[in-house]
Amino acid sequence: MKILLIDDSRTIAAVFAERLGALGHEVCGAGNGAEGVECFRRFAPALVPMDSEMPVLNGCEATSPIRQVEAA
């Protein structure tokens, strides 16, 4: 499964990416919501776990543009 992990903590992102990759998932990472929206456009993931508190766009703010990309 393609998973886009959006988190501004490099440590948390690295741990989750390693574990998800070990389970056979393809993982793409982004450090904030704005990067996450761009990655969503390119990567077309099936799942997007994300942090709720991040710089630029937080998790709640990033949800709307991600849904717009998904609907297009």
Image (spheres, rainbow, N blue to C red):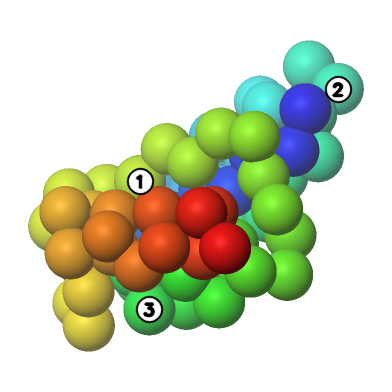
Residue 42: percent from left, percent from top: 73, 70
Residue pointed to by mark 2: 24
| Label 1: element kind | loop
The residue depicted at 22 percent of the width and 83 percent of the height is 56
Q: Position of residue 41 (x, y in %)?
A: 63, 69
Position of residue 39 in the picture relative to residue 60 (left or right): right
Residue linked to disc 3: 34
Gap in angstroms between the C-alphas marked 3 and 2 = 26 Å
In the rendered structure, which amino acid carries the disc numbered 1? Met
- Residue at x 40%, y 54% (from the top left corner): 67
- The circle on residue 50 is 1
Considering depth in this image, is 43 or 11 the residue closer to the camera? 43
Q: In which quarter of the image is the C terminus?
A: bottom right
At label 2, which amino acid type do we have? Gly
Q: Is residue 39 left or right of residue 58?
A: right
Q: Residue furthest top?
A: 23
What residue is shown at x 47% (from left), y 70% (from top)?
37
